[in-house]
Amino acid sequence: MTTAGKRMAHDHHFIDDKFNAFAVAARGGRLSRFQLEDAIRRLRHHFWVEEEFVFPPLAHSSPGPVVAMLREHGVIWDHVDELEAILEMDEPDLDMALAVFAALRQELDTHNETEDSVLYPVADDMLGDDLSKPVLNALATEMPEGWRCQMAQAKV
């Protein structure tokens, strides 16, 4: 049976592959706009699922780790905002995009490792089917228009 945690961990790898494809293209001198836009869209959807469906039930018993994950979401979201701003330039600066991506990648690697090895197994153990059904349903639906993670800086 696919648990919410296993599905969310799989989502990490899928999103990472999209970001990595963008980075490979950028290092080769090409802007893979589709890969980056798709990675960003999927990452933001992933955060929505976590913040709306995974974290709230865990916050009652494990508020510290949930707050840490929310803070990391904010930092990651802000890096993604920076990448989007670069994409919106008339002539996007690939070196700048790669520098922002390097910071994003570092944050994502640490964040995903914690979620995959600690948070998701705890969520599956504690919440079981009560968590899996809403999370799996949310993963199959669209994120609400204009949703932003709780700890992202205001878009300027």
Image (cartoon, helix red, strand yellow):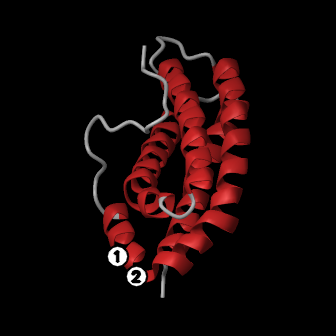
Q: Is residue 28 visible?
A: no
Query: What element does badge 2 sit on?
Result: helix
- Residue toward you, 73 or 87: 73
Q: Quadrant of residue 28?
A: top right
User: In whole angstroms, how far apart are the C-alphas of marks 2 and 1?
Assistant: 6 Å
Report the disc number at residue 97: none
Residue at x 46% of width, y 39% of height? 34
- In the image, residue 121 lies at what x, y percent? 61, 73
- Residue toward you, 106 or 126: 126
Q: Is the C terminus in the top left, top right, bottom left or bottom right quadrant?
A: top left
Q: Is residue 18 visible?
A: yes
Is 24 positioned to the left or the right of 136 in the image? Answer: right
Relative to 84, residue 127 above or below: below
Relative to 111, residue 91 above or below: above
- In the image, residue 10 lies at what x, y percent? 56, 67
Crowding near the residue tagged with mark 1, few <14, some 14–19, many ≥20 C-alpha atoms within 10 Å: few
Residue at x 49% of width, y 19% of height? 85
Residue at x 59% of width, y 48% of height? 69
Is 130 positioned to the left or the right of 115 in the image? Answer: left
* Residue reaching furthest to the left: 145
Crowding near the residue tagged with mark 2, few <14, some 14–19, many ≥20 C-alpha atoms within 10 Å: few
Numbered-mark total: 2
Kindly indicate whether the residue at mark 1 contacts the one at mark 2 (C-beta within 8 angstroms): yes
Residue at x 43% of width, y 64% of height? 57
Is 82 positioned to the left or the right of 44 in the image? Answer: right
Report the disc number at residue 129: 2
The residue where tag 1 is placed is 133
- In the image, residue 78 lies at what x, y percent? 54, 28
Q: Amino acid at mark 2?
A: Asp
